[in-house]
Image: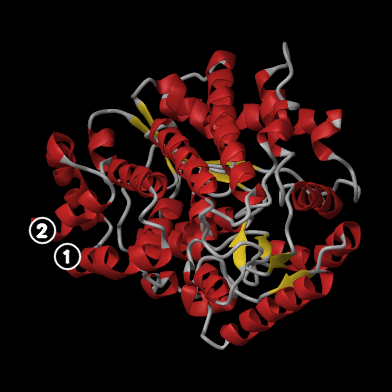
């Protein structure tokens, strides 16, 4: 592989001098692991990244770099295993706190990765690859309503892309496809994954605030505790309450920065950051990085300064008064969608209807068992809970910030969340009085978005602009 393309890529993201020279071999190893050619890297530098990400913001460049560092760490998995370290693969979405506590407890001898999520994000968000074009041969065609991450899990196993970990921690809080994929691989490939599964029945009454229900929190905490014992049996590393509390605090520190950035962006007019960039900073809401929170926190601190400067200068992505459309789950893996809205005069923003750090702090009470705190946080996350509880969280975000509408629809492939989105729109719209829109699509796959979606996007933008004129 030629160095020139890879030097340009790292320089664009902020590497320079001795740090660049030290990281260049790691990145080239990661690029080979990710099946990225020199032409792929040149395309990212010259076309994809400048078109869909605000490369003039140092915070954005640092955030992309943090993801690239994680990908480079993932590419060294075989080396970690050969050295006798333990490796945990986790599936999305998860309780990031519980998984990260293993990294904390391991002190460099336990590595935690979300391999399918990281590879999917790097390919689609930064290099413009259509994910469904990368996952062929497994028989799990996305057109058959399979999540593209699970297609990638199956296909990457057939292609021997990832070495077998010490243990896989499957999370079935939102997605029940991951354990099914394991069963399929065991049948087709004879691979018996060393597997831990954490799941909770979705039997809560509609409207229950699940994070405040002691019985459900206790059940979730015991599920987490039991799964951790099983994982520790494989890794040989016990996770103490102190380890879990440290992971909790690290996650809350990250969330506090994210909330501050979101507050600045969402309350400013003109809006000083593109929706893709804001969504990218939420990457560790339901996962953790083996490289820790340090690089992400630095990126967030830098982004906060970037945004404060733009606000002081009165600079924005679009002119003052441009409509803001809050996206229920901004598809950063399909970044052209945000640009399509922006090109039509509408800010697609918010990124995730995530609970604010302030909401999560209430889950971590002084003297409370660490697993109870982690469980309560997990049940204060959208999609993990009953529909009306999620509506409550969604409406809290929609009324907290000045937005002109809300957009849903990027889970058409999902039999669970996709159906839930369609059902909850009417209830959320009635509670907030804000117009809600639905755009059929697949969060993971750009190929599922043909350009005929543009007519729907233009119609939504026109509706928002007309509504704004009428309100004015």
Q: Observer-nearest residue: 359 or 463?
A: 463
Which x, y percent locates residue 276?
50, 59
Q: CA distance from mark 2 to mark 1?
A: 9 Å
Name of the residue lying farthest toward the top: 367
Q: In the rendered image, which residue does mark 1 sit on?
A: 38
Instruction: Classify mark 2: helix, strand or loop.
Output: helix
Left or right side of 175 for 394: right
Mark seen at residue 4 = 2
Q: Observer-nearest residue: 7 or 321?
A: 321
Which marked residue is nearer to the observer: mark 2 or mark 1? 2
Question: Is 305 drawn above or below residue 398 in the view shown?
Answer: above
Q: Are marks 2 and 1 in contact (CB under 8 Å)?
A: yes
Which x, y percent locates residue 221?
71, 29
Q: Observer-nearest residue: 148 or 472?
A: 472
| Quadrant where the image shows the C terminus | bottom right
Which x, y percent locates residue 90?
49, 43
């Amino acid at each position: 592989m030629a160095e020139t393309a890879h030097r340009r890529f790292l320089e664009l993201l902020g590497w320079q001098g001795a740090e660049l020279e030290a990281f260049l071999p790691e990145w080239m190893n990661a690029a080979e692991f990710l099946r990225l050619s020199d032409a792929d890297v040149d395309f990212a530098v010259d076309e994809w990244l400048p078109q869909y990400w605000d490369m003039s913001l140092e915070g954005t460049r640092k955030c992309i770099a943090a993801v690239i560092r994680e990908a480079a760490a993932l590419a060294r998995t075989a080396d970690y295993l050969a050295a006798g370290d333990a490796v945990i693969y986790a599936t999305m979405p998860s309780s990031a706190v519980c998984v990260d506590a293993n990294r904390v407890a391991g002190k460099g001898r336990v590595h935690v990765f979300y391999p399918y999520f990281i590879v999917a994000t790097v390919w689609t968000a930064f290099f413009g690859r259509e994910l469904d074009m990368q996952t062929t041969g497994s028989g799990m065609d996305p057109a058959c309503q399979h999540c593209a991450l699970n297609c990638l899990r199956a296909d990457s196993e057939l292609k021997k892309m990832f070495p077998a970990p010490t243990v896989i921690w499957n999370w079935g809080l939102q997605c029940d496809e991951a354990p099914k994929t394991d069963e399929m691989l065991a049948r087709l490939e004879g691979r018996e994954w060393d597997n831990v599964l954490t799941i909770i029945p979705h039997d809560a009454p509609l409207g229950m605030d699940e994070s405040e229900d002691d019985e459900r929190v206790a059940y979730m905490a015991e599920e987490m505790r039991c799964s951790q014992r099983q994982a520790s049996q494989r890794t040989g590393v016990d996770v103490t309450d102190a380890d879990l509390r440290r992971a909790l605090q690290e996650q809350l520190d990250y969330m506090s920065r994210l909330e501050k950035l979101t507050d600045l962006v969402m309350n400013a007019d003109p809006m000083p950051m593109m929706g893709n960039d804001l969504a990218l900073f939420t990457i560790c809401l339901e996962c953790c990085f083996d490289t820790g929170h340090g690089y992400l926190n630095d990126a967030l601190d830098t982004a906060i300064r970037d945004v404060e400067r733009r606000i002081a200068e009165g600079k924005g992505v679009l002119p003052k008064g441009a409509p803001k459309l809050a996206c229920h789950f901004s598809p950063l893996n399909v970044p052209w969608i945000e640009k399509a809205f922006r090109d039509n005069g509408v800010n697609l923003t918010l990124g995730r209807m995530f609970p604010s750090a302030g909401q999560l702090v209430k889950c971590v009470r002084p003297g409370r068992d660490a697993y109870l705190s982690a469980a309560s946080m997990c049940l204060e996350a959208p999609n993990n809970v009953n529909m009306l509880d999620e509506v409550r969280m969604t409406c809290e975000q929609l009324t907290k910030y000045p937005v002109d509408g809300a957009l849903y629809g990027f889970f058409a492939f999902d039999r669970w969340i996709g159906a839930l989105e369609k059902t909850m729109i009417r209830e959320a719209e009635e509670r907030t009085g804000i117009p809600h829109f639905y755009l059929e699509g697949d969060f993971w796959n750009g190929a599922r978005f043909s350009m005929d979606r543009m007519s729907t996007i233009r119609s939504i933008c026109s509706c928002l602009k007309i509504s704004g004129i009428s309100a004015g």
